[in-house]
Image (cartoon, rainbow, N blue to C red):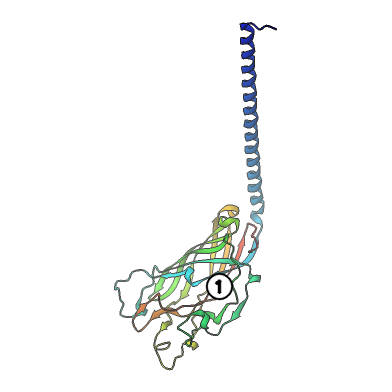
């Protein structure tokens, strides 16, 4: 069969038209799929918001345990009028901060035992000297930490009388899974009476006196304090509620010297800081790993 030029041209136009029709059809199908996905996502978002609204009147509560290592805890004192105060206990702690970052664990996995003094493993003033832990208790062992479960933040002393803290203001994050993105935002501002310099590691009553009686001096634990959940991220968006934080184990004496009137980071301090965190909120709470 012999094709003329006009016939070839007509076939070419027909093929081009079919190609364009197929491409436009495929693009139309893809666009429809995108629209369907967007509608499905909007429907799921509405369902989640409705579920949160339905749960607004519900109350969920759970307890957690936070364990903070010495290297993950810091106590920062603001600059004073005098670089070297005449008396260490004359320091003004207004604006001083405590910063911490510890792992979150299931209370069933953490065993707290009595510890009547440090041991050689604590690297506290050599082999013979012993110091007491605040509360005279410590975790028996530390479970494996999940990087998505942690408790961190900062507390600032907002009311003081010299070295005695009378009140504080805290902003804290309690993250419970989701790779560290499902977090509760906590504000804590209340009365908080505590003197971190009540007894220090080097003083006439501790390691500079003979006989050595540091083993008989037990540091005080800080008081418990309440906090308010002011929102959250991830699954905790829109969360409200409250928490209660109680310290049940602490470290040895404050690393300071009343002889030289200095606080020295090279002075020994041992012990884990363990806190019980009770949470009550309107959002379901996961079990800690």
Instruction: Give the quarter of the figure containing the C terminus.
Output: bottom right
Determine which quarter of the picture holds residue 263.
Answer: bottom left
Figure label count: 1
Furthest residue in direction left, as rendered:
82
Instruction: Give the quarter of the figure containing the N terminus.
Output: top right
Q: 98 above or below 51?
A: below
Q: Which residue is mark 1?
A: 274
Indicate left or right for 72 with 66 as reference.
Answer: left
Q: 153 above or below 204?
A: above
Query: Which residue shows up at 63% across the image and 44% down it?
Result: 45
Indicate left or right for 224 with 267 as reference.
Answer: right
Determine which quarter of the picture holds residue 89.
Answer: bottom left
Query: Which residue shows up at 39% across the image and 88% down it?
Result: 208
Crowd around label 1: few <14 · some 14–19 · many ≥20 (10 Å): many
Tell me where residue 120 appears, x and y as whole percent: 51, 83
Please name whichever residue, 57 or 231, is drawn nearer the observer in this view of the structure.
231
Tell me where residue 216 appears, x and y as whole percent: 49, 88
Question: Is residue 237 something one can see in this rendering?
Answer: no
Furthest residue in direction front, as rendered:
1
């Amino acid at each position: 069969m012999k094709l003329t030029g006009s016939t070839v041209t007509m076939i070419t136009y027909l093929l081009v038209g079919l190609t364009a029709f197929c491409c436009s059809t495929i693009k139309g199908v893809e666009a429809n799929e995108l629209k369907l996905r967007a509608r499905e996502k909007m429907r799921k978002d509405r369902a989640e918001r409705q579920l949160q609204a339905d749960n607004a009147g519900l109350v969920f509560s759970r307890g957690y345990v936070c364990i903070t290592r010495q290297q993950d805890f810091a106590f920062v004192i603001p600059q004073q009028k005098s670089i070297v105060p005449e008396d260490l206990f004359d320091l003004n702690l207004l604006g001083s901060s405590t910063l911490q970052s510890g792992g979150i664990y299931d209370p069933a996995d953490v065993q707290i035992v009595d510890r009547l003094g440090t041991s050689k493993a604590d690297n506290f003033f050599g082999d013979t000297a012993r110091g007491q832990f605040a509360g005279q208790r410590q975790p028996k062992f530390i479970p494996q930490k999940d990087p998505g479960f942690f408790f961190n933040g900062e507390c600032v002393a907002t009311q003081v009388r010299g070295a005695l803290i009378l009140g504080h203001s805290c902003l804290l994050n309690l993250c419970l899974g989701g790779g560290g993105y499902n977090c509760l935002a906590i504000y804590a501002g209340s009365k908080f009476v505590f003197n971190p310099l009540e007894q220090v590691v080097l003083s006439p009553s501790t390691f500079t006196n003979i006989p050595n009686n540091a083993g008989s001096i037990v540091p005080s634990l800080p008081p418990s304090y309440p906090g308010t959940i002011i929102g959250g991220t991830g699954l905790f968006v829109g969360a409200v509620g409250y928490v209660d934080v109680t310290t049940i184990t602490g470290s040895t004496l404050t690393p300071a010297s009343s002889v030289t009137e200095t606080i020295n980071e090279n002075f020994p301090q041992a012990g884990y800081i363990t806190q019980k965190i009770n949470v009550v909120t309107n959002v379901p709470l996961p079990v800690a790993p």
